Amino acid sequence: MSLDGRRAVVTGGASGIGAATARALAAQGAHVVIADLDGSAAAAVAAELGGEAWQVDLGDTAALDGLVLEADILVNNAGIQRVAPIVDFDPAAFRAIQRIMVEAPFLLIRASLPHMYARGWGRVVNISSVHGLRASAFKSAYVTAKHALEGLSKVTALEGAPHGVTSNCVNPGYVRTPLVEKQIADQAAVHGIPESEVVEKVMLTEAAVKRLLEPEEVADLVVWLCGASSGMVTGASYVMDGGWSAR
């Protein structure tokens, strides 16, 4: 596989799945733009890969309305998480999650498609979640956003098909990332268990394979979806959940 000459934009690219994906795409020859709220961390990853850093606040969606993005590959990965019962869920946090994880991907896709259409080739990969297909209690905002992202991805696939553009979702279970680590305390609180028991009793309880995913495993699938042999794969959701959704 070669992605020589392809320009890839990866949101949330400074850490976790995003950084692993950026490295994997760069290893195949893509020029990678690391888009992240943390400009210093984005610059560090970009310097490592010979790419570019783009410091951007994806929560400020109004600033993205007129964006023009020259991307052959767009990986919508950025996300945040909040864990709380619906009756206690902060409305402002709910709205912020929808902006970052639904509105921003829409606007970035909208900004990228004219370039992809002009070149007759493009790849949109949306990092969804098993929570794009299944629900868990106490994650109303996250589950809502991931389900919406699934729909956006499918519409993009239908509209992009005549122009050589594919759009797919990757749906991991729990991945060993800062996003997962940061929710352990909240999970312990809402479930009434010690933090030391969260991984086993909450995160891995539904999975048949009892381990966390590694970011590099997710990145490998993203790279394949961007390659030449995946041209007939579009509008799909690729589950990497250790058998969670098989139940």
Image: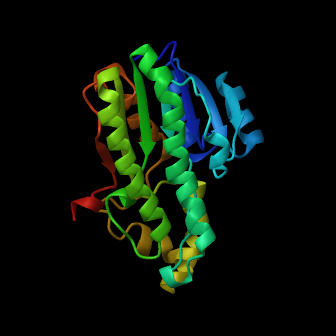
What residue lies at 74% left-to-right and 33% top-to-bottom? Answer: 43
**Toward which corner of the image does residue 232 lie, by quadrant?**
top left
Residue drawn at (46%, 28%) of the image:
113
Percent coordinates x, y for residue 98 in the rendering: 53, 58
Name the residue located 59 percent from the left edge and 26 percent from the top edge.
Answer: 32
Which residue is at the front of the view, 148 or 37? Answer: 148
Would you say 152 lies left or right of 26 here? left
Left or right: residue 85 compared with residue 49: left
> x, y (%) of residue 146?
42, 56
In the orientation shown, which residue stands out farthest toward the bottom? 192
Q: Is residue 149 above or below residue 123?
A: below
Q: How many marks?
A: 0
Vertical side of 155 occupied by 178: above or below: below
> For residue 11, what is the image quadrant?
top right
Q: Residue 105 in the image: x percent, y percent?
A: 51, 44
Determine whether, in the image, residue 244 is placed left or right of residue 220: left
Residue nearest the observer in this picture, 104 or 23: 104
Q: Would you say residue 140 is visible in this rendering?
A: yes
